Image (cartoon, helix red, strand yellow):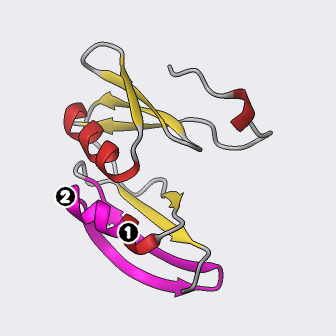
C-alpha cells in the first residue's frame, strides 16, 4: 500500500478506497488523465494510487457499481468534466446546482459511477 502522508490524516476521515478493475492499466491511464493520480504497481493484479486528498488501490476483478458513490471536489467543475470526457468517461448526470454548489456524475471505463462537486456557483 502507499505510504499515507501524516499531514493529511484526520480522525475518522476516509483514508483509502479500493476498486475492482477488469483492466488495471486502463484504469490507471483514465485516472492519471482526469485527476493526475500517481500509481505504484504491486505485481500485475494490484496498484495503489495517491492523490492530493485520497489514497486507494485497484485490484483485478469484475467491477460492482452502485454500492458506494465516491465524490471528488473540483475548483473548476467545467474543466474537470471536460477532462473526464476527454479520458473516455461517460457523463450520467450533467452539471446541476444543489444547495451546496454544483455537481456532476460520471462513469469511468470500468462502469463505476463517481461524482464531482464544487462549492462555486459561477
Residue at the (28%, 21%) spot, across then down: 45
For the residue pair 62 and 56, the one nearer the viewer reads as 56
- Above or below residue 3? Residue 105 is below
Sequence order check: which comes first, mark 2 or mark 1? 1
Residue at the (49%, 53%) spot, across then down: 68
Q: CB atoms at circles 2 and 1 under 8 Å apart?
A: no
Foreground: disc 2 or disc 1:
1
* Residue 101 is a magenta residue: yes
Residue at the (33%, 43%) spot, across then down: 32
Q: Residue furthest right?
A: 11
**Residue range of the region highlighted in magenta in the rendering:** 81-108
Compared across the picture, whether 97 is left or right of 36 comes to right
The residue indicated by pointer 2 is 88
Q: Position of residue 50 (x, y in %)?
A: 49, 34
Q: Position of residue 10 (x, y in %)?
A: 77, 40
For the residue pair 20 and 86, the one nearer the viewer reads as 86
Q: Residue furthest top?
A: 43
Helix, strand or loop under label 1? helix
- Above or below residue 63? Residue 45 is above
Q: Position of residue 23 (x, y in %)?
A: 19, 35
The residue indicated by pointer 1 is 79
Compared across the picture, whether 54 is left or right of 7 comes to left
Q: Position of residue 78 (x, y in %)?
A: 39, 74
Task: Find the distance from the CA under tag 2 to the CA under tag 1.
Answer: 15 Å
Q: Which mark is residue 57?
A: none
- Above or below residue 98? Residue 59 is above
Amino acid at each position: 500500500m502507499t505510504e499515507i502522508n501524516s499531514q493529511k490524516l484526520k480522525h475518522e476521515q476516509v483514508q483509502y478506497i479500493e476498486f475492482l478493475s477488469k483492466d488495471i492499466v486502463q484504469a490507471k491511464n483514465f485516472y492519471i488523465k482526469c485527476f493526475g493520480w500517481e500509481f505504484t504497481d504491486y505485481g500485475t493484479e494490484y496498484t495503489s494510487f495517491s492523490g492530493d486528498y485520497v489514497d486507494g488501490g485497484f485490484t483485478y476483478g469484475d467491477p460492482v457499481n452502485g454500492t458506494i458513490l465516491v465524490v471528488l471536489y473540483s475548483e473548476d467543475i467545467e474543466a474537470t468534466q471536460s477532462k473526464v470526457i476527454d479520458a473516455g468517461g461517460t457523463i450520467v448526470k450533467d452539471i446541476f446546482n444543489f444547495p451546496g454548489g454544483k455537481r456532476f456524475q460520471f462513469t469511468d471505463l470500468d462502469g463505476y459511477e463517481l461524482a464531482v462537486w464544487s462549492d462555486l456557483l459561477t
